[in-house]
Image: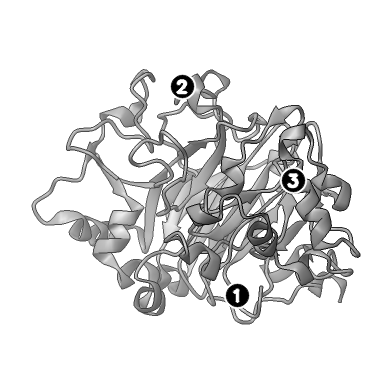
Amino acid sequence: MPSAPNTPVSTTHPATHPATHPTTTLELATRADGVAATVSRELARTQGLLRLAPCWVPRSFLQPGLRIKLHPDDTYAFGLHRGGIDERWFSSTTEAANDNRTPDEGLSYCVVGRERFTLKQAVAESGAELIGERLWKRYGKWPVYAKFFDNMGPIPHHMHQDDAQAALVGQEGKPEAYYFPPQHNPVGNNFPHTFMGLVPGTTKKDVRRCLEQWNAGDNGILDISQAYRLKVGTGWIMEPRVLHAPGSFCTYEPQWGSDVFAMYQSLVEGRMVPWELLVKDMPKEKHRDLDFIVEQLDWEKNVDPNFKANRYLEPVTAAAGAGWHDRWIIYGKMNGFEYFTAKELTVEPGATATVVDNGAYGLTCVQGTGTINGELLSSPRLIRFRELTNDEYFCTEAGAKRGVTFTNTSTTEPLVCLRYFGPEVNPHAPKVGAHCA
């Protein structure tokens, strides 16, 4: 969260990074009437939009894939000891669960004129005005976020705990979903395949044996899993407690507002995965209880013989008009509940579209130049660490229901935007498998 007035604007404040970019001159909101009043004035001016600054997150155990448009000189802006920046979080009110993290790591900042404040603070003070009465009453926060994660190689085979498991350590569970945007995948990097689940017929003893040989090198967890080749422009949903080792595509990932995980793979591309990353979100007294760790997995879902059919997504048309079309890219329920959905809007050169939605959303522009309710909207080619962009907005529920107007001001390329929604916002969204209909 913000530390003190007049702190240079950015989503993070590593002392080693030079404050040389335009956003460093902005100040934290300090008006006497507070953030809520500033938010109300801005929403009236923009018809329901808040402009957001880029939010960068490093991961010490991964190698960045260099496709999220961050300037290469800033890949290690947090310092080499923190690892490279391989993630950008969108409309996030969720703090990153990283060691040695900065106080506001993972939190998106709203920018209004010369002021800035976290989206988390804005939601806390403005509540239903931003996210709608239903979400505010049930959750008291914006309960989801999305990110780009982008790595040179695969992530360790891991799972995310469900609500009951995460509650044991004071956290929330984490379902998630993936979409592979063409604009961010000109190359597939080192391993554009994802291991998911376990081979049907695998036993719990097989997984326990992998845990037993953790310190022997490669513990062999991938020997009892199966990989799927990734395809640009498609996606997957992933329930909690299901193993997955995301491959090297740059991925748009809507997810629940939590950062819990457990890594079940001991060695990835020659890099050691410490045991602590397996048990970090498990009760301390269970850190060496192999049977407990095995039982953390949802066995039926991991060995599902129809694993792909029950989780694989291709875009489905949501709406279309003259010079534009809108597609579902993330849809389908997990364990009977719609945690989030996402759409991809494409507006052709010179065209305008007014798009009506059921609820608040976080939006990022991945291609082209134009306007959103008259505000600048463009996809940058390269971003410095502290630079303020025009590619990210948060739209309120009221603004979404009233309709948001997108205009493509280019004469040569489409304007393409991704937007994700909160839980149970789109009950009429397609079911998994709808692309086959």
Q: Name the residue under label 3.
A: 212
- Foreground residue, 75 or 429? 75
Single out the residue that lies furthest toward the left.
Answer: 32
x and y percent of residue 350 in the render?
A: 61, 51
Q: Mark 1 points at which residue?
A: 338
Of callouts 2 and 1, the N-terminal one:
2
Q: Which residue is drawn at 73% across and 52% down?
A: 244
Q: Which amino acid does label 3 sit on?
A: Glu
Of callouts 3 and 1, the N-terminal one:
3
In this rendering, is residue 70 above or below 293?
above
Q: What residue type is labelled 1?
A: Glu
Q: Which amino acid does label 2 sit on?
A: Gly
Of callouts 3 and 2, the N-terminal one:
2
Badge 2 crowding class, 10 Å Cα cut-off, few under 14, some 14 to 19, many 20 or more, is some
Q: Do the residues labelled 2 and 1 touch (CB within 8 Å)?
A: no
Q: Can residue 390 be seen in this view?
A: yes
Left or right of 280: which side holds 386?
Answer: left
x and y percent of residue 128 in the render?
A: 32, 72
As drawn, the label of residue 79 is 2
Q: Indicate the quadrant where residue 38 lies.
A: bottom left
Q: Which residue is drawn at 87% across and 72% down?
A: 436
- Foreground residue, 27 or 322? 27
Mark 3–mark 1 distance (CA, rounded to whole Å): 37 Å
